Image: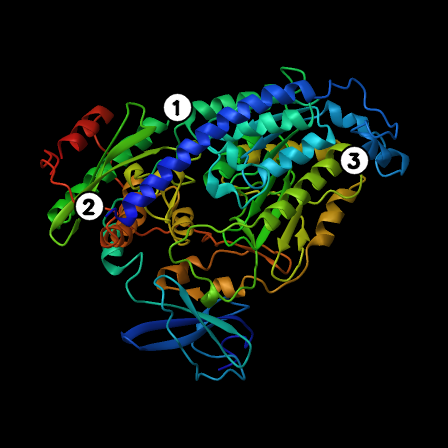
Amino acid sequence: MSDVHHSVFDSVHSDHVLTNEHSVAFTLKTRCRKCSLLTEQLPVGVSPEVHVTLGTERSEPDRLRQNSGLTVYLRDSRPNMADEATRRAVSQIPMLKTHAGPRDRALWPQRLKEEYQALIRFVEQNKAADNDWFRLESNADGTRWTGTCWFVHELLRYEFRLEFDIPVTYPDTAPEVAVPELDGKTAKMYRGGRICLTDHFAPLWARNAPRFGLAHLMALGLGPWLAVEVPDLIGKGLVVHKERPREAAE
Amino acid sequence: MATVEELKLRVRELENELIKCKQKQCAMEDAHSQALNRPKIDKMSAEVVDSNPYSRLMALKRMGIVDDYEKIRTFTVAVVGVGGVGSVTAEMLTRCGIGKLLLFDYDKVELANMNRLFFQPHQAGLSKVEAAEHTLRNINPDVSFETHNYNITTMENFTHFMDRISQGGLEEGKPVDLVLSCVDNFEARMAINTACNELGQIWMESGVSENAVSGHIQLIIPGETACFACAPPLVVAANIDEKTLKREGVCAASLPTTMGVVAGLLVQNVLKYLLKFGTVSYYLGYNAMQDFFPSMAMKANPQCNDRYCRRQQEEYKKKEAERPKVEVVEEEEEVVHEDNEWGIELVSEVTDAELQAASGTVPDLPEGITVAYTIPAEEPTSGDTVEETEQSLEDLMAQMRKL
């Protein structure tokens, strides 16, 4: 067996599934240093018996140590910021093709068209799935975006204004989405109501640049943020439902 | 009975009122202190008398540390981000007698900033650049100041920002000597990187981690050393057990100590670079938990995403080829690289999606420095892309509005 791979490993991976609240089933895999392949073969001396404790916080990786001194991280697979539903929704958003930011006079209009195409597709999909939750529109040159997003909690609809500028470094960096009316109400926010995204969002965006667009930003950035923060703010009484005339948008 | 919320609101109102009163009082004190300000000094003197603000700095010459300290007055430095690190950086440079400072920041002073150095409670509500200029001018009237209260990452501001970097030197029309990034977010760093790559402007990046216990400084010479886009963001490993790091209910922590240390490291490197003494660091990390200072140099990435970085690399190569063959610099850089097994933990942090992404290469980094994330070498090919469309942008905008 050790001939197949080179018996030299520089990392251990685990494939795991959560079987119920408290137990995890997984297989450990090691990456062969020479051929880089993942194999279920473990380095000599590493016991496959490992002890797992699930983290208590969502999205926080859980770590387990082994006698060999190798370290394995297990990510808590309970629903988190990028849960199954989100992943499915994202997989249906078309990827963008044009790598151009607002400073690229020649190609930006094409990129902007693709942004709108992807956004329209995403909103239509949301509607079809009875999960319509935001509207966005831009100024003529597509550098400033405004819109609304809404969140239904206990059958009541809470609506918020949202806004952001396209940074000059877009699409290499994501825009900073702001929900100004929630400014000062939650610590998960920077000045001016810019939402604080998780540690996972920046790598996710960087890995998928320039193919991710604004629709992805909504689905993976703002959507999960609202899902976590709004119920919490309502619970704390910081967001109170106000009857509003239903907008044509709905 | 008033609710807690109402009371909180009232406290806020009163705080704001207090700020206004203090500002008024401050303005009056200013008028008073104007009278106390020392006059400008034309020439730095080395004379050791109580009244000479430059005597201890000029002593560096007598001790043989710096050849020509007065030269500091000919330099212009742009400080982008006047927060915990930037304000202290600006103060240090002001006290050192720098020629001109350009300050960029769009933010206002808040009471929440008071755990850091430099700003004072009575300045709350003022723009950071305005408040900073005021304090700094009082400290050293010999320094020229130029302040810009805007966000550099938006289109129109960015153009202006680039213009000031390339034209805002001590002598108008000349570029600044150095740009210092003291910002707190990735977008702004990338914007500075973009500007400096396009202009061929040498700059230094600085940063403090969101958990406040590590930081770094980095010298970026476009085309020569790795730019900010050449590799995923580098982080100083804090060796903190992930389990004990709670993120519930907070976005960022900060300490005046870490910020002060990083500002100190940054300005030290600036002085060494500008006044040509000691060894200038290319990358210096600070791990506050173990008091560990990893350092290294990293070459520009020929596959960097930024095309201006690639262009600068071409030019650097040409220049190097033309230079007589005394390639000491290159050797030095290679010596700094050490074999290491870092990146292991990063690679093994696994979800299915990340497992694939984890195959991205981790640059060869010394112990204690790692990357925030890796990027796969090949672009993922799965997933639909947007289709070709006959519709114009206006059609699409209208369609979006109608939804």
Position of the C terminus of chain A, as image quadrant, is: top left
- Local secondary structure at mark 1: loop
Find out whether the residues at labels 1 and 3 contact each other: C-beta distance under 8 Å: no
Q: Residues within 10 Å of mark 3 (few under 14, many from 20)?
A: some
Q: Is residue A223 positioned above or below B238 on the image?
A: above
What chain letter is assigned to the residue under label 1?
Answer: A
The residue shown at (81%, 24%) is B44
Pick the residue in front: A27 or A166. A166
Closest to the observer: B357 or B159? B159
Residue hosting label 2: A240
Distance CA(mark 1)–CA(mark 3)? 41 Å
As displayed, is residue B338 above or below residue A172?
below
Q: Residue furthest front?
A: B1
SS for dot 2: loop
Question: Can the viewer see residue A170 in this picture?
Answer: no
Residue A105, label in figure: 1
Disc 3 marks a residue whose amino acid type is: Lys
Q: Nearer the viewer, residue B167 or A204?
A: B167
- Report crowding for label 1: few under 14, some 14 to 19, many 20 or more residues within 10 A (C-alpha): few
Mark 2 chain: A
Q: Which numbered disc covers residue B255?
A: none
For disc 3, the marked residue is: B276
Q: Nearer the viewer, mark 2 or mark 3?
A: 2
Q: Quadrant of residue B143?
A: top right
Closest to the camera, between mark 1 and mark 3, is 3
Mark 3, chain letter?
B
Q: How is the image coloured?
A: rainbow
Tell me the distance, in whole angstroms, between the alpha carbons under discs 2 and 3.
61 Å
Question: Horizontal placement of A244 versus A186: left or right?
Answer: left
Name the secondary structure under disc 3: loop
Location of residue A105 (image quadrant): top left
